[in-house]
Image (spheres, helix red, strand yellow):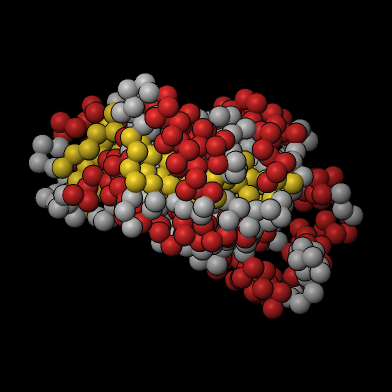
Amino acid sequence: MQTIYYDLRDTKGQQKEIEDKISAAAKILREGGLVGIPTETVYGLGADGTNPAAVRRIFQVKGRPQDNPLILHVTGAQWLPRYCADIPPVAYTLARKFWPGPLTMILKRQPTVPNETTAGLDTVGIRCPNHPVTLAIIREAGMAIAAPSANTSGRPSCTTAQDVLEDVGSRVDMIVDGGPCTVGVESTVLDLTRDPPRLLRPGGLPVEDIERLIGHIDVDRAVNASLRAEERPGAPGMKYRHYAPKAPVTVITGSPMNSAREIERRAAPGVGVICFDEYAHLFPNQVVRSLGPSSDKFTQAQRVFEALRSFDSTDVQEIFAQCPDNRGLGLAIGNRLKKAAGFHVINADSQRIILGVTGGTGAGKSSALQAVLDLGGSVIDCDAVYHQILSESDEFKNAINEKFPGVFTAEGQLNRKKLGQEVFAKRDRLEHLNAIVYRFLIPELEAMVAAADGLCALDAINLFESGLDRLCDRTIAVTAPTELRVKRVMARDHITEQYARLRINAQKQDEYYRGKCDCELNNASDSPEEFRREAYLFFERLIEAIQEEKRRG
């Protein structure tokens, strides 16, 4: 196949020539062809998103897994009803503010969108790109364009038309050169079928900007860890190893100075380096690719894919990459680097602290963990991760149902009370359940802890039984008098006193946690606010002690 290459930057202002080239691209799309198109994020490999045969060609050309859904590109919110169903008002709120721009919304799909586009899901991703050429092509074609990034599957995304030529040039019908991409990382993907909305992929629109408009957003665990083999991704880029050059990548997180020094320590012959401008001088004997200044995340986003791609023309055998923090565009840049590394991440900060917080239900762990957040830390809620895996993994559900028949409804929902009554009354049954849960849960939690920066608390009632205590700098038992715990559980979960006592008696007692943990935080207060203040001071002193230990080595 001979590819037509159109450079719309060389038209010297001739509007008729531009219009003719746009019409030619639209005609190819209407006839089921493939066109490499520019957007503000990355170049896309476009096809008619409602034509199953054309969409199948995208997968064939890219070598893309069939369960990896595509995004539809439209010219504005007026197109939403054509392709989406049950559209919530927040979708129009977001579109008014952020379209055209790097925001993809996941919504329920209309029957007009084929399974090939959505990978069989009942949802579809849709966005309005901020590039005048592609918007003109969509209008001229008269249909939504399905357009994943134009690289071959697994490679770093294309941010120039030349990248597209290198990856898929001989296998597409046309490539439109609209200049280098101005954003440089793919769109932010937000699932609006959930309440609260969930971030499935960080991208060119910082999540902080979205939260300022619509409030809190949950973050999917796929942002910081790989999905398991049996899980179906809800958006592009969630499951498979992406953005990877031929040489293996290791990401170094932490402060810029610490991460640069850690790479310097590892910079043996054959090592390539991706670093911020200020630290390039540390690597005179390495192949170095600069991301830009450490404070300039806009430049880093524009350069990250080109930096990764460029190593394939060198003989480096291993790549170490500095990583920005998770604020603003840093979350998307770090996500791309970590996916390129298969989430092989090393934290260079000696101040990284992992606390394991455990104790029986009703003891006050929630208030204690809120104090960790007040101190600027983060919390990994093991129970929340468990429920997320349960909602997404059929293999996990089947494993539980095989051991505990009848605990799932006909709709596939877990009857927690029925399962709880069975396992809490029989300790051996509880051990069987825990063994199943740990098999699925522990790898996810290990990856999340490995990706944590700064202060992080692991909220785990079975901290020691699961072996998660080995990941922690300190383990803390949150304890409380039994009668206070009973009252709290009754009020919190709206259950009877008998069931509250059954739950508490099925768990380890405070003596167990005192004997296992490094320290104890006792909650005898009737006021959650008062205990939160006590916990703040407790953790403040504990962190200072840990930091002093780390400084002394």
Q: Residue 413 appears at what percent x and percent y?
A: 77, 63
Is 6 above or below relative to 451? above
Task: Say which quadrant the C terminus sits in.
Answer: top left
| 256 sits to left or right of 194 | left
Along the line of sight, the residue nearer the viewer: 509 or 451? 451
Residue drawn at x 51%, y 32% is: 136
Along the line of sight, the residue nearer the viewer: 531 or 320? 320
| 132 sits to left or right of 351 | right
Is residue 385 visible to us here? no
Q: Residue 130 appears at what percent x and percent y?
A: 50, 30
Q: Residue 142 appears at what percent x and percent y?
A: 60, 41
Residue drawn at x 58%, y 29% is: 99
Is residue 109 visible to us here? yes
- Number of numbered discs overlaid on the protein picture: 0
Residue drawn at x 68%, y 39% is: 80
Q: Residue 19 appears at what percent x and percent y?
A: 45, 31
Along the line of sight, the residue nearer the viewer: 517 or 425? 425
| 217 sits to left or right of 541 | right
